[in-house]
């Protein structure tokens, strides 16, 4: 049994019904955790040797519910194995505890997920927008956010567009 | 008038309350903006420095100036068309980005890649690695005012760019790797060109080493600067040559080999100090090891097709369209709608010249990716910058940033 399979089995045993589901797809294991237990689950994996948080991102399944899936990928250098945790969140007021106390490098990734998806990481040491300007409204990578092309500002509609424009005003 | 100015300044300082220490707000230490336009920040990186004299107390990076919404744009394109956007993230490693994305697609849809394509992929990815490290060496030396190295490395890079242009028509944004293999077969003269490069490069590399490795000025400016230990690096998610310079021989080409890397014989260089000088040593040695891989790949290059012949994913050659109805149907489907990927998600990490580059790809049964996320090494490595630069001088900060090798296209996407 590979280390990630062993870790998944141990995780399921330790966490019982807080691990909602688990799946293996194309040889990669993922365990679905309840949002409240994510910090504990991460500590568990870190103690088992998955010391590197290699990815933290999110996906938006709008209009399906649960809408968001926060994806965590961990790497164990001793065993050369990848394992994943996922948290499913609903669309209204998505919130999940921050894991940056366990994995400090989660901070920037969480900031990016907050910026792009609007997911609140409670207890984060520093949750600000990272890629978009600090006063941007909206969360660009949500599926209901438009891909967004800028209105072309010709001379005939210059003033109208200037009223609506949020940036680069002369 | 001055009240307005004061009000403006107060608002700005308020926003900074969480970021900088109380000493800065009191005015004891100086806040310096190393703005997005700066010749030494390797791109549009903004750093808010809190300085006590010239010593850095804290450094707050502000990124997002090169954010072009690549991930969101890729969701609106078919899988194959979205490939062209991957070149533009880490623009010094375009073939490496292509490789990461293609491997993720191939894992998701379970597509085979013929052996010739795999070897060519390895060959070109390693040439890209050499080209990226050459740029790194040149700009790193340039930041430390050793301008000759910059001019020499660019000269070598021209040869590599000519090779890429020969294959794909483009010097940089090649989009040469496609799901299933390569876009087209290698042209005539490719092997001679690569062999020429292999013959001349080791001497050139020695030239660069003669200029820098034992240069007392260089050593003075880089030894002991920006030290990071293995534990600290793992805590902060630093990977790639930065982690290897601290001592951990972690290289995904060895630990999770992909695209046939397990057949090649190469070493993973490490150093022990974790400072800027060690990162230089590691990257120069990596160039040598990449050259070894290129040499082996050139020798091993098998004959055969360069793209999978699974017509559900790979368009048929044009010669077939004249006499095969199935070919026409496949061609039509692939060029109008594109192939569909099943529901599910994969995460595929590869080793880019900067560290671990991972592609998280979510398919939803349709022809366009539902979500593509790239875990880019520069984004993760830059997080370590404040820790690495505490207590150093501003001039050292320039050396530290360049030794981390951030590429802002990679950071912001």
Image (cartoon, rainbow, N blue to C red):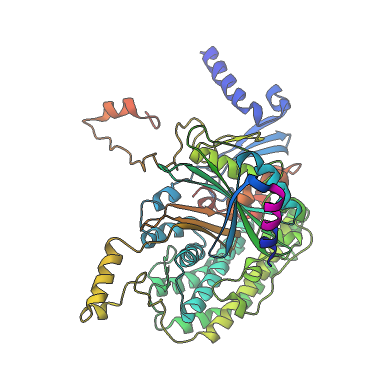
Q: Can residue B218 be spotted in the picture? A: no
Could you say where residue B20 lies in the image, as x and y percent from the top left?
68, 31
Compared to B55, does B8 lie above or below?
above
State the predominant SS element of the stretch in magenta: helix
User: B35 or B302: nearer the eye?
Assistant: B302
Could you say where residue B292 lies in the image, as x and y percent from the top left?
62, 79
Residue A10 lies in the magenta stretch? yes
Residue A119 lies in the magenta stretch? no
Residue A125 falls in image quadrant: top right
Compared to A18, does A3 lie above or below?
below
Q: Can residue A90 be spotted in the picture? A: yes
Q: Which residues are magenta?
A: A8-15
User: A20 or B113: nearer the eye?
Assistant: A20
Could you say where residue B61 lies in the image, as x and y percent from the top left?
61, 41
Q: Say which quadrant the C terminus of chain A sits in.
A: top left
User: B69 or B288: nearer the eye?
Assistant: B69
Could you say where residue A60 lies in the image, as x and y percent from the top left?
46, 44
Residue plotted at (26% across, 80% down): B320
User: B105 or A9: nearer the eye?
Assistant: A9
Compared to A12, does B213 lie above or below?
below
Compared to B283, does B199 lie above or below?
below
Q: Say which quadrant the N terminus of chain A sits in.
A: bottom right
Indicate left or right for B300 with B26 as reference. left
Residue plotted at (42% across, 48% down): B72
Residue plotted at (47% across, 32% down): A136
């Amino acid at each position: 049994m590979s280390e990630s399979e062993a870790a998944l089995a141990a995780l399921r045993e330790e966490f019982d019904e807080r691990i909602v589901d688990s799946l293996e797809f194309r040889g990669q294991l993922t365990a679905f955790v309840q949002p409240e237990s994510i910090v504990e689950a991460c500590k568990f994996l870190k103690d088992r040797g998955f010391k590197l948080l290699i990815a933290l991102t999110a996906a938006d399944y709008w209009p399906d519910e649960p809408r968001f899936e926060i994806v965590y990928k961990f790497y164990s250098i001793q065993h050369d194995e990848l394992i994943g945790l996922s948290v499913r969140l609903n669309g209204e007021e998505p919130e999940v505890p921050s894991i940056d106390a366990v994995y400090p490098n989660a901070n920037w990734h969480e900031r990016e997920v907050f910026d792009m998806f609007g997911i609140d990481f409670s207890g984060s040491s520093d949750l600000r927008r990272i890629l978009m300007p600090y006063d941007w409204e909206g969360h660009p990578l949500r599926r209901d956010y438009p891909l967004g092309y800028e209105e072309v500002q010709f001379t005939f509609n210059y003033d109208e567009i200037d009223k609506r424009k949020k940036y680069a005003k002369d | 008038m001055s009240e307005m100015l004061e009000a403006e300044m107060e608002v700005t300082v308020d926003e900074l309350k969480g970021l900088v220490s109380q000493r800065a707000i009191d005015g004891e230490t100086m806040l310096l903006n190393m703005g997005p336009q700066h010749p030494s920040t390797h791109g549009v990186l903004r750093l808010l420095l809190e300085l006590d004299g010239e010593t850095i107390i804290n450094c707050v990076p502000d990124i997002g100036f090169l954010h072009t919404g690549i991930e969101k744009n890729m969701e609106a394109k078919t899988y194959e068309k979205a490939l062209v956007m991957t070149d533009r993230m880490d623009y010094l490693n375009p073939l490496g980005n292509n490789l990461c994305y293609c491997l993720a697609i191939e894992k998701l849809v379970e597509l085979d890649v013929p052996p010739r394509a795999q070897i060519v992929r390895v060959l070109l990815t390693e040439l890209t690695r050499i080209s990226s490290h050459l740029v790194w060496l040149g700009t790193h030396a340039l930041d430390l005012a050793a301008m000759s190295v910059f001019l020499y490395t660019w000269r070598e890079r021209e040869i590599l760019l000519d090779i890429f242009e020969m294959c794909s028509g483009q010097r940089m944004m090649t989009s040469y790797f496609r799901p299933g293999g390569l876009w087209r077969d290698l042209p005539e003269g490719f092997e001679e060109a690569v062999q020429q490069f292999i013959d001349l490069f080791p001497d050139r590399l020695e030239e660069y080493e003669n200029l820098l490795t034992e240069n007392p000025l260089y050593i003075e400016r880089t030894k002991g600067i920006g030290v990071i230990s293995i534990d600290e690096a793992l805590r902060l998610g630093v990977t790639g040559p930065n982690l290897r310079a601290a001592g951990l021989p972690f290289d995904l080409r060895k630990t999770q080999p992909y695209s046939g890397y397990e057949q090649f014989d190469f070493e993973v260089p490490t150093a022990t100090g974790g400072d800027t000088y060690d990162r230089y040593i590691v990257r120069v040695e990596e160039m040598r090891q990449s050259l070894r891989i290129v040499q082996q790949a050139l020798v091993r290059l098998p004959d055969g097709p360069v793209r999978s012949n699974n017509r559900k994913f790979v368009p048929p050659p044009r010669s077939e369209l004249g006499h095969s109805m199935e070919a026409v149907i496949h061609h039509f489907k692939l060029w109008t709608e594109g192939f569909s990927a099943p529901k599910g998600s994969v995460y595929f990490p590869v080793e880019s010249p900067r560290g671990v580059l991972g592609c998280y790809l979510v398919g939803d049964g349709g022809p366009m990716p539902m979500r593509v996320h790239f875990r880019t090494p520069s984004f993760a490595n830059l997080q370590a910058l404040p820790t690495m630069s505490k207590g150093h001088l501003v001039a050292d900060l320039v050396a530290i940033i360049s030794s981390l090798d951030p590429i802002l296209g990679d950071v912001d996407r």
